[in-house]
Image (cartoon, rainbow, N blue to C red):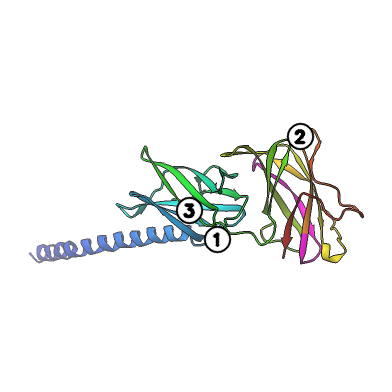
Amino acid sequence: MLCLIFNTTKMKTLKYILPILSLLFITSCTKNDENILLDETAELHFIKTLSNTDHDVEVFSTKSNLEQGYNNLYIRIREKATDMYVENASITWKPIMNMMMMKHSSPKSEVTKTEGKRTLYNGYIVFQMAENATEKWDLTIDYTVNNITYTIKDLISVSASVKKNVAVFMKDNVKYVMVLIDPKEPKVGLNNFKIGLYKMENMMSFLVVENYMIKQDPRMPSMGNHSSPNNTDLIFDTASNIYEGNISFTMTGYWKLNFMLYNATNQLVKGEEVTANNDSSSLFLEIEF
């Protein structure tokens, strides 16, 4: 009889404890889930939220703001009805510069799911020019969730770069865009050097230029226009679709990165050799650190 009473009491106790444990478990999981989502953007800079009736599309960057040149961007989509972030979506984007007399797009990558992340998608956009008082960039994002297609569009602010990190030029009626990608944080010594090269197919489409070669000659104008040792030509990498090499800086300060661009048949497309009588190439970018 005592045993029966003990078991009954134990069962009654469990009856009250189990719901509490379940609530604690659910609350803990929810908090952990929220922490995971916060951690996914912890090292990124929030840029802007684009909204439509169904979703908020959050745009982040590795830099504190969008600027002329190469921009590595991240996107995540929040469903307004559930306040949940979408984990499976197909996304494309199109940046448009609205000029006084025309519109044009810019070089950009595809948008893909960020490796190891649940809600983030990423890609890059090269803004070849900054906004001004009358000419602005907008960004259209088309995306599909659960076989339903949505679109969202808004203005975005693109500031001018402090130094020249993108060059636009014409050759044989083809417009080219060259952009500095790395080093993002240059240092004295040898640096990994990465350059993007694109050509305009039409006003709304830019193609990666493959299998060219970029000769470089970095110079320091304030120090007798001296160069540096151990620099290598930039060669096209088929895996990354960019041009890669090494660049050496012997000291901090302002450097002019002079280039000579050769096509796949080794013909000079743009740029000149730096000599005693020519202190700079017409094709150059800048770094100061």
Mark 2 or mark 1, earlier in chain: 1
Q: Residue furthest right?
A: 276
**Tag 3 residue:** 155
Looking at the rendered structure, the kind of residue marked 1 is Asn
| Local crowd size for mark 3, using a 10 Å CA cut-off: few (<14), some (14–19), many (≥20) | some
Image quadrant containing the C terminus: bottom right
Q: Secondary structure at mark 1?
A: loop
Asked if the residue under mark 1 is in contact with the one under mark 2, i.e. CB atoms within 8 Å, the reply is no
Residue 249 is situated, as x and y percent measured from the top left of the image, at 79, 61
Task: Name the residue carrying label 2.
Answer: 264
The residue labelled by disc 1 is 65
Q: CA distance from mark 2 to mark 1?
A: 36 Å
Q: Residue at x 68, y 55 (%)?
A: 165
Residue lying at the far left of the rendered structure: 1
Mark 1 / mark 3, whichever is N-terminal = 1
**Residue 106 location in percent, x, y?**
59, 45
